[in-house]
């Protein structure tokens, strides 16, 4: 156990932090699902939490041993537009880094016919945010279950540590 006794807890803590960020993003999306005007004059654009794991030093050392000159990155991301600001970075024992980036979704805004809306154009159409409440609720449930799974992993690790101390 090169990460010590607390490596499993650090990994789960990284997952907890990432899933908390994802739930915050989903909550922000749901809160702005009907916002037709932001500070820049456009409808609210849906945000996405993108998870990325970087095995920096370990892969770089293995690459050098195998004769490769450049470092490698292993990333797990959702497809689509991924540029954005990094909101959470945690180093998990052994050189593994977990990043959660928040990036705008590149999908098109919805166009709704509502001539009485204050933001309607001359034809009566309003650009609405690209937020689908059903998709957001599915994302929230997924993040919530992943959060619960990480809590369960922390609890299991604690129980294993307690059992090991009894031996």
Image: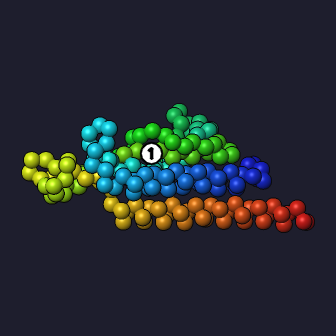
Name which residue lies at 77% across and 50% down: 4
Where is residue 100? Give x, y as percent: 51, 46
Q: Nearer the viewer, residue 90 or 35?
A: 35
**Vertical comparison of 62 with 27: above or below:** above
How many numbered marks are there?
1
Q: Is residue 80 visible?
A: no
Q: Is residue 132 visible?
A: yes
Label 1: few (<14), some or many (≥20) within 10 Å? many
In the picture, residue 116 is in which quadrant? bottom left
Name which residue lies at 61% across and 50% down: 14
Q: Secondary structure at mark 1?
A: strand
In this picture, residue 44 sits left or right of residue 65: left
Name which residue lies at 78% across and 65% down: 159
Q: Nearer the viewer, residue 11 or 37?
A: 37
Query: What residue sits right under mark 1 in the picture?
Result: 102
Name which residue lies at 32% across and 47% down: 44
- Quarter of the figure that contains the C terminus: bottom right
In this picture, residue 71 sits left or right of residue 80: right
In this picture, residue 49 sits left or right of residue 13: left
Where is residue 8? Give x, y as percent: 70, 55
Q: Nearer the viewer, residue 47 or 119?
A: 119
């Amino acid at each position: 156990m090169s990460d010590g006794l607390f490596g499993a807890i650090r990994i789960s803590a990284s997952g907890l932090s990432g899933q908390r960020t994802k739930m915050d993003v989903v909550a922000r999306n749901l809160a702005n699902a009907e916002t037709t005007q932001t500070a820049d004059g456009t409808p609210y654009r849906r945000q996405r939490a993108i998870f990325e794991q970087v095995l920096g030093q370990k892969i770089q050392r293995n690459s050098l041993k195998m004769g490769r000159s450049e470092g490698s990155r292993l990333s797990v991301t959702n497809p689509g537009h991924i540029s954005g600001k990094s909101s959470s970075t945690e180093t998990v024992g052994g050189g593994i880094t977990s990043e959660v980036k928040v990036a705008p979704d590149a999908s098109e805004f919805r166009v709704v016919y509502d001539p009485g809306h204050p933001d309607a154009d001359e034809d009566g159409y309003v650009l609405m945010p690209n937020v689908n409440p059903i998709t957001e609720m599915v994302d929230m449930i997924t993040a919530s279950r992943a959060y619960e799974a990480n809590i369960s992993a922390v609890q299991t690790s604690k129980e294993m540590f307690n059992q090991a101390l009894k031996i």
